Amino acid sequence: MSLDQLQPAEQALVGIYGPYCQGAKRNFLPQAISLYQKGALEGVRKIEGGDSIPFIATWYVSKLPAELTRCRLQFDGNADLSYEITLENSKYINYLIDVITTFRTNKYIDFPQEFYRKLLRVDE
């Protein structure tokens, strides 16, 4: 499945998440919720000056913005390169909006740098 083929989520769900999404990001909220409902995503982590590393992200799907989602990323098909992060659904959906906008701009699927900083607990 390509991100170009995402169908927008139901308007009722978009309305629930609307207050958690600001500015221009709201334009991508229906597609981000649809992606979230799939519970998985395959992409590549772009490494500056190096080879890209493929990943698979999986997460538990729930309906409420304030509920927690546990997301697991496994890099390069290697169980030793697995990482987990738990955060509010609304925050995770905002990261998925970033994934969609990156894809539309650069034609590859990757999370934003801020997501990886949280995943790897760089700022703790």
Image: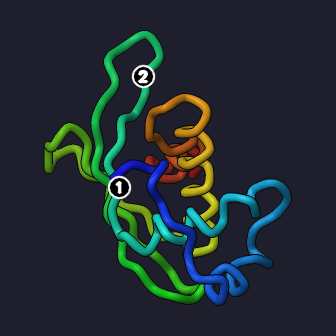
At a point 49% along the width and 70% down the height, the residue shown is: 34
Q: Nearer the viewer, residue 113 or 6?
A: 6
Residue under numbered circle 1: 41
Q: Position of residue 9 (x, y in %)?
A: 55, 75
Q: Nearer the viewer, residue 78 or 17?
A: 17
Q: Amino acid at mark 1?
A: Leu
**Left or right of residue 27, residue 5 in this image:** left
Q: Tags 1 and 2 in contact by the CB under 8 Å rule?
A: no
At a point 43% along the width and 63% down the height, the residue shown is: 85
Q: Which mark is residue 47?
A: 2
Q: Position of residue 55 (x, y in %)?
A: 29, 43
Looking at the image, is 3 positioned above or below residue 52?
below
Judged from the image, the secondary structure of the residue bearing numbered disc 2 is loop
At a point 79% along the width and 78% down the height, the residue shown is: 19
Q: Amino acid at mark 2?
A: Ile
**Left or right of residue 26, residue 57 in this image:** left
Q: Nearer the viewer's eye, disc 1 or disc 2?
A: 1
The colour scheme used to paint the residues is rainbow
Q: Which mark is residue 71?
A: none
Q: Residues within 10 Å of mark 1 (few under 14, many from 20)?
A: some
Q: Quadrant of residue 96?
A: bottom right
Looking at the image, the residue that sits furthest to the top is 49
Q: Residues within 10 Å of mark 2 (few under 14, many from 20)?
A: few
Q: Earlier in the sequence, mark 1 or mark 2?
A: 1
**Left or right of residue 9, residue 12 in this image:** right
Q: Position of residue 31 (x, y in %)?
A: 57, 63
The CA distance from mark 1 to mark 2 is 19 Å
Judged from the image, the secondary structure of the residue bearing numbered disc 1 is strand
Looking at the image, is 50 positioned above or below residue 84?
above
